[in-house]
Amino acid sequence: MKKRIGWLAMAVALSGFALYSESYGWKIDETLKYQIVYLPSDTRPMSTVPGDSIQVMKPLLKNIPAFKPDIGNIVYKNICGLGFSLPVRENASSLKLYLKIYAWPATLDPVRSSYKIFNDFLLYALPGGERLYASAKNRANTFVKYASIDSADREFSLKKSFEAPEVPSQWEFDCHTPFSSIYVKPNNESHKKSEIAQAKASAGGVIEFHAAISDLYEKSLRLLQVANGKKYFADFRLCPEKPEKICVVRIYEIPIEPLVFSNYRDLPMPQDADKIFLSGLLLVKLTDYAAVLPFPLKEMTNVYPGTKTFESGFHALWSHMLEVGSVLDMR
C-alpha cells in the first residue's frame, strides 16, 4: 500500500511558504471562483415573514430576478445518473434541481466550510492548491449555491418566488453540502481569433487540474481498478484490533479524461447566458464507506463500487462531488 501524504505536506501548503509557480497549468477563475452547494435536509426553501429580523441570503447575480432560480434546467434524474449523491426521489424524471447563487453570509465561516472539502480531496498537496486555501480566507471569493428539488413544471413569479433561504447554522450548512464547484482557467489564456479555438483552449485549466490531481492520487493512494471510464482509488482505515482487515474505506473516483465540450453554445452560464459558456468539466467523487463486517485487506483486488462484492460488503456513510469547471467568457 502506498504511503499517504503526511501532515507535514499539508502544513507546508497551508503555511504560505509554497511558492507560486507559472508551471502550474491552472489558476482560479476570478469571476466564478468557488461555489458550495447547500441542500437543506427538507429540500424546501425556508420562508420568512415580512418584517422579521431573520437574516436571509442575498442573491449574487443582478441579471436574474430575485424570485427566479439562476439555474433551472437540471433534470433530477439526469444529475443523479451522473453519480451525485442526492436524496432518492420517486418520479425523478419529473423533478428538477433548482440552483441560485448567493453571496457568502456574514454568519458563516468560509474557511471552515471550504477547508474541510479541500482537505478531504487532498488539495493541500496539489501543485497550486495553496491558492485555493488562500482565496477561501476572503469570504468574497466563496459563494453559496442554494439547491431545491421541485416539480419540473414549477413556474416562478413574484407571488410564487424562489425564496431566499434563511441562513443556517454553521453545523447545518456543513452537513448538507453534496457538491461544490471550482472554476479554473489555463495559466496562459488563448487570444486566438477563432471562437472554437478559444473555447477549446479555455478548457486547458480543467485539463491541467485533472492531470495534477490524477498524478497526486496515483502517488498517494491505492489504485483499486480502472473501469467504466474512471479510476478508483482507495484510502483504507484498518480495524484497530484487526489490522489485517478494513473497517472504513474512502473511495476517490476520477474520470480517465475530463470533459471538453464542443457544444459549449448549448451550455450557457447564468452569469451571462449570451456570452459565457461551459467549456470543460471534471467530476471527482469522494465517498466514505463502512464495512458491514471487517473486510480482509488482501481481498480488495478487483473490489470497488459497483461490484457485487463491494455493494454487499460496504455501505456509504457520506459523499461529496467536486466539480472543476471552465468557461468560455466572450465578454
Image (spheres, helix red, strand yellow):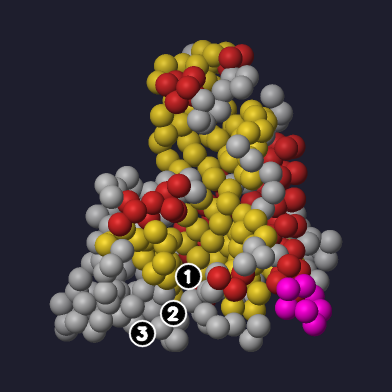
**Residue type at numbered disc 1:** Phe
**Residue type at numbered disc 2:** Leu
Q: Main secondary structure of the magenta part?
A: loop
Q: CA distance from mark 3 to mark 1?
A: 18 Å
Which residue is located at x 69 percent, y 24 percent? Answer: 1
Question: Closer to us: mark 3 or mark 1?
Answer: 3
Residue 66 in the image: above or below residue 257 = below
Q: Which residue is mark 1?
A: 143
Q: Which residue is mark 2?
A: 60
Q: Earlier in the sequence, mark 3 or mark 1?
A: 3
- Secondary structure under tag 1 reads strand
Res. 144 in view? yes
- Residues at discs 2 and 1 in contact (Cβ within 8 Å): yes
Quadrant in the picture for residue 299: top right
Q: Which residue is mark 3?
A: 65
Decide whether residue 191 is among the magenta residues: yes
Q: Which mark is residue 196?
A: none
The residues colored magenta run 189-197
Question: How many residues crowd around disc 1 within 10 Å: few (fewer than 14), some, or many (20 or more)?
Answer: many
Residue 291 in the image: above or below residue 195 = above
Res. 240 in view? no
User: In the rendered view of the protein, which quadrant contains the C terminus?
Assistant: bottom right
Q: Earlier in the sequence, mark 3 or mark 2?
A: 2
**Residue type at numbered disc 3:** Pro
